[in-house]
């Protein structure tokens, strides 16, 4: 077993103290190690020009923009926090992401798409994702107790960035969830996997999206995130304030006013989910 270097141990401790997720910690360590291997020296002996040369190398190798920016985040953390060089991070440039318009389904396409999902559990999960604008990980992470029918909200526990938030519980979604609960009898996880002690795998949702597109004759690449984009777009088209949409989506770059609104259940409950405007079949025919 290779002994961990003091520098790596310090960086891990720095990330742990700041409550970075295990996935983020692994990503940062991998990026800094790759940087070090490229030059064959300890990263503590490398400077800003080396960082620039490494970025040029990664771009030449065809790295994706998101992966490049993840490396930038790792190096900025390493130099700014672990090495304590406060002047360096702001000089490590992020890549400008090409701005592409997201794929959005029309209301009719949402109905056709969801009704093309034959599995009760998967259809209900994807319907929930659209009705509340959830990420795939947030959808599979739901527990039965997160559905608060009395207050008309859904608790999203440990969303992106480890933050909790509430989203609206659509009246139509509540009816669908009640039918689903009566038939499927979930115990702890709202959408359990084959082993009931764990949630359904996100890959199951992704596969269901691909199959539903073909079955519904939708010539678009639809993922769970497409349903989230469609949720936000349909809310905007229905006149919902953009700040409320930001709160419902759990975006982190919110003003202090918008942050306050995320604890206002009355405001969330008064916001109508786009699902409530659709005529959707509750249970798959088979």
Image: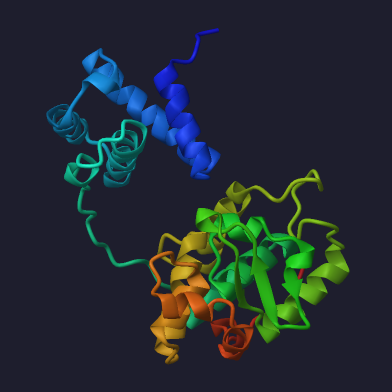
Which picture quadrant has residue 46? top left
Looking at the image, can residue 163 be seen?
Answer: yes
The total of numbered circles placed on residues is 0
Image position of 3 with respect to 211: above or below: above
Coordinates of residue 65 in the picture (x, y in percent): 26, 46
Closer to the camera in the image, 174 or 54: 54
Closer to the camera in the image, 195 or 271: 271
Which quadrant is the N terminus positioned in? top right
Coordinates of residue 147 in the picture (x, y in percent): 74, 71
Image position of 235 with respect to 138: above or below: below
> Which residue in the rendered view is the most extreme toward the top?
1
Image position of 207 with respect to 117: above or below: above
Which quadrant is the C terminus positioned in? bottom right
Is 224 placed left or right of 169 in the picture? Answer: left
Q: Residue at x 86, y 58 (%)?
A: 187
Is 47 placed left or right of 163 in the picture? Answer: left
Q: Residue at x 34, y 42 (%)?
A: 70
Image position of 215 with respect to 170: above or below: above
Coordinates of residue 136 in the picture (x, y in percent): 56, 57
Snapshot colouring: rainbow
Looking at the image, can residue 234 be seen?
Answer: no
Closer to the camera in the image, 172 or 214: 172
Q: Residue at x 86, y 67 (%)?
A: 183
Q: Residue at x 69, y 86 (%)?
A: 171
Coordinates of residue 247 in the picture (x, y in percent): 48, 75
């Amino acid at each position: 077993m290779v002994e961990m270097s003091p520098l790596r141990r310090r960086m891990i401790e720095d990330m742990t103290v700041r409550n970075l997720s295990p996935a983020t910690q692994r990503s940062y360590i991998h990026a800094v190690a790759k940087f070090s291997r490229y030059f064959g020296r300890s990263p503590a002996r490398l400077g800003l020009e080396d960082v620039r040369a490494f970025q040029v190398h990664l771009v030449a190798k065809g790295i994706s923009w998101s992966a490049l920016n993840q490396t930038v985040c790792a190096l900025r953390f390493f130099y700014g926090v672990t090495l304590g060089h406060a002047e360096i991070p702001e000089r490590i440039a992020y890549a400008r992401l090409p701005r592409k318009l997201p794929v959005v389904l029309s209301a009719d396409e949402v109905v056709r798409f969801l009704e093309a999902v034959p599995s009760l559990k998967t259809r209900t999960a994807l319907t929930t994702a659209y009705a509340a604008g959830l990420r795939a990980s947030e959808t599979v992470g739901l527990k039965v107790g997160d559905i608060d029918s009395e207050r008309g909200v859904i608790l999203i526990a440990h969303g992106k960035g480890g933050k909790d938030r509430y989203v609206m519980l659509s009246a139509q979604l509540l009816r669908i969830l009640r039918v689903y609960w009566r038939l499927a009898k979930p115990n702890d996880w709202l959408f359990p996997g084959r082993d009931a002690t764990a949630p359904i795998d996100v890959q199951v949702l992704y596969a269901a999206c691909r199959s539903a597109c073909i079955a519904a004759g939708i010539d678009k690449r639809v993922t769970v995130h497409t349903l989230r984009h469609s949720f936000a777009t349909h809310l905007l088209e229905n006149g919902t304030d953009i700040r409320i949409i930001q709160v419902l989506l759990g975006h982190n770059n919110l003003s202090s006013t918008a942050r306050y609104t995320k604890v206002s259940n009355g405001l969330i409950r008064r916001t109508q989910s786009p699902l409530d405007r659709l005529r959707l079949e509750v249970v798959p025919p088979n």
